Image (spheres, rainbow, N blue to C red):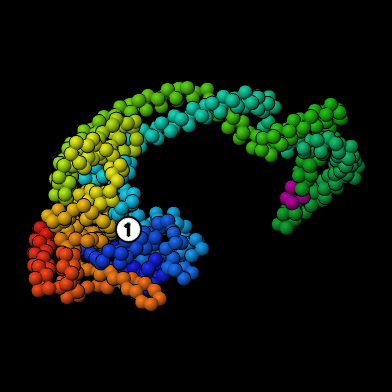
Amino acid sequence: MIERLSVKNFAIIKDLDIIFNSGLNIITGETGAGKSIIIEAVHMALGGRADSALVRTGCSKALIQLVISDPSSEEDIILTREIQSGGRSTCRINDEIVTLSKLASLCRKYVDIHGQYDNQALLNPENHINILDSYDFNGIGSAKSDYIELFSEYTVLADNLSRLRKQQAEGMRKKDFMEFELAEIEKANPSPGEDDELKERLSFLQNREKIFSSAGSAYEQLYAREGSCSELLMSSLSEIKKISSLSSQFSDIQEIIEDCYYRLEEVSSVLSGFTDSIDFSPDEIDSIISRQETIEALKKKYGGSVEAVLEYKEKLAEELSLIDSSDEFKKELSEKINRQKELVSESAALLSRLRKEAALDMQDAVNRELSELGFKNSRFEVEFTPAAFGPDGADKIEFLISTNKGEALKPLAKIASGGEISRIMLAFKRITGSCSSVPTFIFDEIDTGISGHAAAVVGKKLYQISADHQIICITHLPQIAVMGDYHYLIEKFSDDSETYTTVSEMDRETLLREIARLSGSGELTEGARMNAEEMLTGAALRKQGIKNQHNV
């Protein structure tokens, strides 16, 4: 709720500070004292369009600050609007500069101003379906939740089908190229590690003369020539065998020499194989180089390694398989969508039926409220128009009203009078009760065109709503003013150099004088005092009765 409003150098307001309270806050004052300026200042603080013409004459800027308590937070929200006389304005939320749109978006959750020329949520037909659903939430809520779940599943399936069609179309455009790439890889048919094997084989062949020479020389020295390592080892082994039985040490040495001899034979055999198997065919070298070029080209195009090429090959095969089978997937998905659409249609029909039942009840309730609020010949109806499936069902709903006998029903937005709009909104607030999550309602000119009993009914309904919401109301009628929990008097003063407005919370004596003034008495005579006392006493009894009903 709004806790505090501070205004400096705005229109005829020089320096003003108001502390508001929960419940029904009533603002009164002489015509021209600046009551509407207070509402305009609040409107600016909440993100309304700035008008530099409202900067106080002779001042460089106007400053408006609004303190709002947030039930979900331990800290208050401080909204600041600074308007320069040159036309620029600055918005702040808790000292952080924000855009005007962000400020306005935040404030819609906390304050709703109902006054002449204000385009409220009730006037927007897009909100009417949610207002109706909130009115009979117990009857509609469960069916709407079921519909939303079914429609959400339908939307997912429809999106999947749309995405599949796009992918299929895109895939068909790429299919020929993908088939070309797959054929190129399959034709080359590389194997894992083949590039390393080719590199090693090519190196071997390119160094064959060196290999033949060195391997042959090593073989000669180790095994083939007279006095080779093999021959010397055998001779050494023969000598050790002669004495191996004399000591275990000699026996161990014999085993070591035998092992060396046999290992030397293995090495010699390998070296002999090298020299015997070297093929000097230049065709093999050319073939290897050609194969390397083929594989390197694949690596360059498809991932940088043979393994990446093979992975890309698998990916191509999978994607082509999906393209070839997408018609089947599309058919299966279309069948699922048709089944889901039937469920959505059934759910939407149920939701529409429940809404129409609730609409009849709402029409009766609103018409009763409007009659009590002074619309004796008014007529309110909820219009249903079939619509395509959407997040809220298959209904287009708009509230229609005729405020005068003989007039055709019209959309609420066509109502010209701010006073009528405010009283209609009041009727809705009365029947929807705590459905609205906005904590503060501000009513300006809600008493336009009414008096007497209708004014007393408006005051009663404002007080009823104030049990669940903070209400700030500007009024000219004593029947409404006496129902307030807190009363503020706006006064305008002038001296030799300037005019300025003040606001003060009224004490009992000031309140009696103001009620008398609103009732038409220029002075607080004894009769005017008694009448004001009676009105306040009667209001206190009505308020206590409302409290008792609310607490039941």
Crowding near pointer 1: few (<14 within 10 Å), some, many (20+)? Answer: some
> Horizontal and vertical percent for residue 199?
77, 37
Identify which residue is drawn at 23% across, 61% down: 475
> Taken as a whole, is the magenta stretch helix, strand or loop?
helix
Q: Residue at x 36, y 66 (%)?
A: 66
Residue 258 forms part of the magenta stretch: yes
Q: Residue 542 placed where, x, y %?
A: 10, 61
Camera-side residue of 114 and 354: 114
Where is residue 71 shown, x and y percent of the image? 29, 63
Residue at x-position 67% and y-position 35%: 302
Q: Is 231 part of what is drawn in magenta? A: no
Dot 1 amino acid type = Tyr
The image quadrant of residue 543 is bottom left
Q: Is residue 201 left or right of residue 420?
A: right
Q: Quadrant of residue 253?
A: bottom right
Between 419 and 123, the residue placed more toward the observer is 419
Considering every residue shown, the one lying at the far right of the view is 226
Could you say where residue 478 lies in the image, as x and y percent from the top left? Answer: 17, 63
| Residue 353 relative to residue 59: left or right | left
Mark 1 element type: loop
Magenta range: 255-259
- Quadrant where the C terminus sits is bottom left
